[in-house]
Image: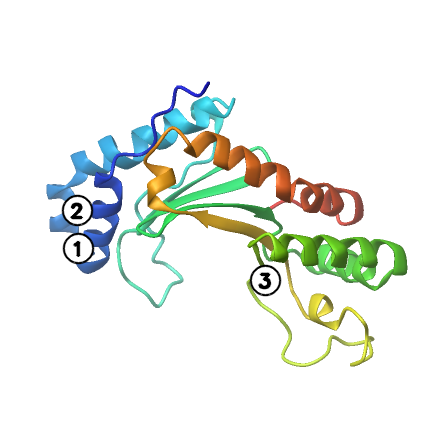
């Protein structure tokens, strides 16, 4: 039985209000709410999932503005990586997913080779179809506008070949996120997307 009670409802109120008041003065006046309702529970959740939060990547609230056109100083979510899986709490709920993120050219080449291969490509297409039927979002952060060089426009997996990376996951609703049902729900998502994680490790050797 999980001991994690879920995130406080204040977490959703905090992120909703932060999106409307993304300023230093407002955040400093509500920093204690962020720590108590968002960051501390995220550490507790990571612990519940069997990972040491002191050795786990958890996002800071401050955004890196050096190369961004958006000069809002604060993130409107908090995220953590638990082994191969990505968790992100926002006003919408808790996103749980896995995949790869903007790989280097060599890794992207291996991804496309694996998609093109009849055996491994068919395996991935079957996973994608199955996950989407279960209500998961399977997508990419970026894709080529038409057809990647070297492949035919009528390739049976052209949708996957156009992707520059791939990820799968779903956003758990507030009702689940604020209850003891959260940890079991996260573990179900992890189990469902694990075949994609293993496929990427085998054929691409890439994480997040």
User: Residue sitting at 63 percent across and 42 percent down?
Assistant: 192
Residue beneath label 1, please?
23
| In-image side of 82 versus 179 (left or right) | right
> Which residue appears at 42% of the width and 36% of the height?
58
Question: Between marks 1 and 3, how big is the CA–CA gap?
Answer: 31 Å
Q: By what rule are the colours in the image chosen?
A: rainbow
Local secondary structure at mark 3: loop
Image height of 164 relative to 103, above or below: below
Nearer the observer, 81 or 109: 81
**Please, is residue 29 above or below residue 91 in the view?**
above
- Residue 155 placed where, x, y %? 81, 74
* Label at residue 167: none
Binning the other alpha carbons within 10 Å of mark 3 as few (below 14), some (14 to 19) or many (20 upward) gives some
Question: Does 166 sit left or right of 33 as displayed?
Answer: right
Within-10-Å neighbours for mark 1: few <14, some 14–19, many 20+: few
- Identify the element where label 2 is drawn: helix
- Label disc, if present, on residue 27 of the rendered structure: 2
Q: Earlier in the sequence, mark 3 or mark 2?
A: 2
Which residue lies under the disc numbered 3?
140
Q: Position of residue 204 (x, y in %)?
A: 75, 49
Hey, which quadrant is residue 71 in on the image?
bottom left
Residue at x-position 47% and y-position 22%: 52
Of the pair 102 and 161, the residue shown nearer to us: 161
**Label 1 vs label 3, nearer the camera:** 3
Across and down, in percent, residue 80 comes to 45, 38
Q: Quadrant of residue 21?
A: bottom left
Q: Are marks 2 and 1 in contact (CB under 8 Å)?
A: yes
Depth check: give the residue in front, 86 or 157. 157
């Amino acid at each position: 039985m999980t001991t994690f009670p879920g995130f406080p409802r204040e977490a959703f109120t905090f992120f909703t209000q932060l999106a409307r008041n993304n300023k230093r003065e407002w955040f400093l006046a509500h920093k204690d709410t962020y720590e108590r309702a968002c960051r501390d529970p995220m550490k507790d959740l990571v612990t519940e999932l069997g990972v040491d939060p002191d050795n786990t990547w958890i996002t800071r609230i401050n955004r890196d503005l050096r190369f961004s056109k958006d000069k809002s100083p604060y993130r409107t979510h908090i995220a953590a990586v638990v082994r191969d899986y990505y968790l992100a709490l926002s006003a919408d709920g808790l996103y749980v997913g896995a995949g790869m993120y903007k790989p280097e050219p060599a890794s992207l080449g291996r991804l496309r080779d694996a998609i093109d291969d009849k055996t491994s490509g068919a395996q991935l297409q079957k996973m994608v179809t199955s996950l989407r039927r279960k209500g998961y979002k399977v997508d990419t952060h970026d894709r080529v506008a038409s057809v990647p060089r070297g492949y035919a426009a009528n390739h049976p997996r052209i949708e996957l070949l156009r992707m520059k990376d791939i990820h799968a996951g779903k956003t758990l609703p507030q009702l689940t996120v604020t209850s003891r049902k959260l940890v079991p729900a996260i573990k179900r998502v992890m189990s469902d997307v694990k075949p994609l994680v293993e496929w990427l490790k085998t054929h691409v050797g890439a994480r997040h």
